[in-house]
Amino acid sequence: MNRKNAPAIKDAVEFDITLKPYEKFTLDNGIPVYVVKSDEQDTLQLEMIFPAGSWYEQESQIAAATNFLMKNGSSQHSALQINESIEYFGAYLNRNSFHENATYTLHCLTKHTAQLLPLLQEVIQDPAFAGEELAIYQQNMKQRLAVNLQKCDFVANRYIDKYLFGDFHPYGRVSTMMAYDALQPESLHAFYQKHYTYNNCKIFVAGHLPDDMIPMLNKYFGATKWNGESALLRPELPIQIADEKRHRIFNDENGVQGAVRVARHFPNRYHPDFPKMLVLNTILGGYFGSRLMSNIREDKGYTYGIHSQLYNFRQTSALNIQTEAGRDVCEATIEEIYKELARLQQEPIPAEELSLVRNYMIGTILGDLDGAFQVIQRWKSLILNDLDENYFYNNIRVIKTITAEELQHLAQQYLTPSEFYELVVI
């Protein structure tokens, strides 16, 4: 090897990206288990997923409260005892509630799996929903809400979702003091029994698995029809958009910054334009070298950072441009946003910029597939949305082959300023 000669530089778009396949097992009671194995480190991640998000709740905040409080005590152990047992083994048990789904995720060393699975079983199958734990949760959440409502950024996020989807839609519904006060242990338990059942459960496992991983899962989660059987129908909920598209809200008279949101509806991930829009969004505001960053941060100095993103919701999607800027330049920031939208409509994207974005996006995907934990997340997103690997490979193909002309046409179709909701909270 001649070390005086630098190796050839290979663009990320030249790599042949392959999504590592998963193995699928089925427990005795029918629970599907999706597995991506890796022996690189003696750790594993186990995630249990249920259709128990805000989409299914009849009372506001009940889905998130149920998910949170399942870990806070069972008929056998208190919240303190459960948390101490998890920490004793150096493990981490996280829970999350989203719009469609709710999850419990265990991260642990492989050698401690046998000791931790009984504890996870207790959390999932035997939560107590004690009144004192609910009272603590209500107090903490109301205090957090009171603090957050003083922040313009938090308020802007709440309002832009309400304008896009409506007050009563799960995508636009927001937390309130009254909703927290209305929570009752009986309601939480009823929601739990309907949604956290064996037949509504999916399990995703990644990492270095013990040899008897599937038999252990069968023992604790596959041997019985725990919590009974519940047939859930996904309700179709109407979106009620706001009539007025231009909004200004005064939230903090002593603040020095304002929160800016410019957003519009967009078709969901099943639409053929969605993967194309991911490329256009990256150019607009999806990475540090984007058009919005270069103009509004680097050139104008109005903000420390500005970003645009596509919501990955199941029913629909939205394109949201967001930033915080000085109060005196919020209106100027919006003007510059519209200028960048117009540029994308009027001028083809230069070949050098498009090549840079292609390499950035492919490089990001390569990083996202580095390790079993990342690969299982990619598969989880596909499986939960009734998609397969063809969707993944189609997105790769779009990134590599989409032309400047296609992107300009896309901008002309979806980046018209009159279609955007505009919000400033100061």
Image (cartoon, rainbow, N blue to C red):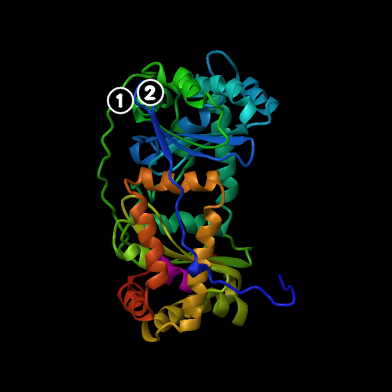
The region drawn magenta spans 278-286
Camera-side residue: 178 or 158? 158
Give the residue type at disc 2. Gln
Q: In the current view of this chain or complex, which residue is farthest to the top? A: 76
Residue 108 left/right relative to 51: right
249 above or below 210? below
Q: In the current view of this chain or complex, which residue is farthest to the front? A: 1
Q: Quadrant of residue 151?
A: bottom right
Q: Which percent across, then down, holds residue 36? A: 49, 40
Q: Are marks 1 and 2 in contact (CB under 8 Å)?
A: yes
Camera-side residue: 311 or 278? 278
Q: Earlier in the sequence, mark 1 or mark 2?
A: 2
Residue 340 left/right relative to 149: left
User: Which numbered marker is on residue 230?
Assistant: 1
Residue located at (53% from left, 59% from top): 366
Mark 1 vs mark 2, CA separation in Å: 8 Å
Q: Secondary structure at mark 2?
A: helix
User: Which numbered marker is on residue 193?
Assistant: 2
Q: Which percent across, then down, holds residue 76? A: 56, 13
118 above or below 170? above
Q: Is residue 213 magenta?
A: no
Q: Quadrant of residue 60?
A: top left
For the question of whether residue 246 can be seen, the reply is no
Q: Which percent across, then down, holds residue 107? A: 59, 35
Which mark's residue is nearer the viewer, 1 or 2? 1
Residue 306 left/right relative to 254: left
Q: Is residue 282 magenta?
A: yes
The C terminus - image quarter: bottom right
Residue located at (47% from left, 73% from top): 283
Give the residue type at disc 1. Ser
